């Protein structure tokens, strides 16, 4: 980034309400208000509850972020906000708040693709130069992207059904573990034997970098039901072994597909991983081992920047603003917003556009 502009970032695409102030590569403040307790009784995120909570918490998060950064709105150079993709009620809450702040202060407004926020995080944390390969792996998305610029992304492969984070959440529900599922399954897996049950490694028998995790989740469901039928219930050790086997299958698929993605790239400066599932310790270690074997720099952002946050939105907004300028007040909230508009839709398309 050529100029250290100060950007206020807002994020409200799912169940984390966040605000942050970033100057250049320096995070002056980052505030995240999660909604875990609000959704705990439902086994997943309820969009209506999430949207209402965002509307209630956004102003408080902004106030706290500005205070923690030791600044105020008059000293902010621009306002960046997640404009999609995500749960439309939450995205709309953030976009309307950002529009109001922009109109009231006269500060430039920048609409940011939530996935671009994750994809550019390695530049925020490690100043990784373009172009680089990133595995963006989260609750709703899983893609291999060559990042060529702040708004220039080439997709090498993506999930054709469930994202890994979604599969982790569903696995946790099937096994009676708490949400969010990723940390619960990972914790249980540390006590299990990954070889106790045989799980498939989907799509490894096919060329390319596309992924699939729906069948893996179904295989776990069938194994669980077989155990319940044969022994009259599910023991704690069974849960640990099932989690370990499931996590190992996800790891093996992502490592092999990452190897293929690296082979398909030329002239990249590094390999990075980002998104909520990138917080999984076993996965990060396996991907780092792969990168080291191929003698390519590996970047894994701090765990706090893997999950949804507004610092990544502020930084991505700054890069977009310096490259392409600002948006105006016609900025729309978008439930779907693919990064690589040239690639065919991986998950189909509808009236609202390509899903990914």
Image: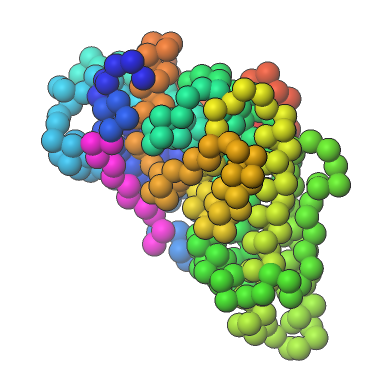
Q: Nearer the viewer, residue 216 or 60?
A: 216
Q: Which residues are magenta?
A: 27-37
Residue at 69% over, 70% down = 194
Any part of residue 93 in sight: no
Residue lying furthest right in this view? 205
Give coordinates of residue 144: x percent, y percent: 64, 35
Residue at 15% over, 22% down = 74
Give coordinates of residue 311: x percent, y percent: 34, 36
**162 sits left or right of 327 in the view:** right
- Dividing the picture into quarters, in which one does residue 291 lie? top right
Question: Per the image, is 31 magenta?
Answer: yes
Q: Main secondary structure of the magenta part?
A: strand
The quadrant the N terminus occupies is top left
**91 sits left or right of 160 in the view:** left
Name above or below for residue 117 compared with residue 217. Answer: above
Give coordinates of residue 52: x percent, y percent: 38, 46
Name above or below for residue 100 compared with residue 206. Answer: above
**200 sits left or right of 132 in the view:** right
Residue at 14% over, 31% down = 71
The quadrant the C terminus occupies is top right
Name above or below for residue 285 compared with residue 246. Answer: above
Instruction: State how many labels appear.
Output: 0
């Amino acid at each position: 980034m050529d100029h250290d502009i100060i950007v206020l970032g807002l994020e409200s695409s799912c169940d984390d309400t966040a605000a942050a102030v970033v100057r250049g590569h320096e995070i002056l403040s980052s505030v995240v208000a999660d909604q875990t307790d609000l959704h705990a009784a439902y086994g997943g995120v309820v969009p209506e509850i999430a949207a209402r909570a965002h509307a209630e918490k956004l102003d408080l998060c902004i106030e706290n972020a500005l205070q923690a950064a030791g600044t105020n709105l008059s000293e902010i150079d621009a306002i960046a906000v997640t404009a999609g993709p995500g749960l439309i009620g939450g995205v709309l809450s953030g976009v309307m708040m950002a529009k109001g702040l922009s109109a009231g202060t006269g500060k430039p407004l920048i609409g940011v693709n939530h996935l671009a926020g994750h994809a550019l995080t390695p530049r925020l944390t490690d100043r990784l130069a373009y172009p680089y390969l990133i595995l963006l792996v989260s609750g709703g998305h899983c893609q291999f992207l060559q990042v060529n610029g702040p708004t220039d992304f080439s997709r090498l492969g993506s999930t054709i059904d469930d994202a890994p984070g979604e599969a982790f959440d569903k696995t946790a529900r099937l096994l009676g573990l708490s949400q969010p599922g990723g940390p619960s399954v990972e914790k249980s897996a540390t006590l299990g034997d990954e070889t106790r049950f045989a799980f498939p490694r989907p799509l490894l028998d096919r060329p390319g970098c596309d992924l699939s995790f729906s069948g893996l989740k179904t295989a776990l469901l069938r194994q669980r039901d077989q155990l319940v039928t044969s022994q009259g219930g599910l023991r704690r050790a069974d849960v640990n072994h099932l989690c370990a086997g499931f996590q190992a299958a996800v790891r093996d698929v992502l490592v092999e597909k990452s190897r293929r993605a690296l082979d398909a790239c030329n002239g990249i400066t590094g390999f990075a991983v980002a998104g909520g599932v990138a917080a999984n310790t076993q996965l990060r270690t396996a991907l780092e081992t792969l990168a080291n074997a191929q003698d390519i720099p590996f970047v894994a952002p701090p765990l706090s920047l893997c999950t949804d946050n507004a610092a990544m939105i502020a930084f991505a907004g700054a890069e977009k603003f310096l490259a392409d300028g600002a948006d105006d007040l016609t900025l729309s909230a978008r439930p779907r917003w693919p990064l690589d508009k040239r690639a065919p839709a991986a998950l189909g398309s509808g009236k609202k556009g390509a899903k990914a």
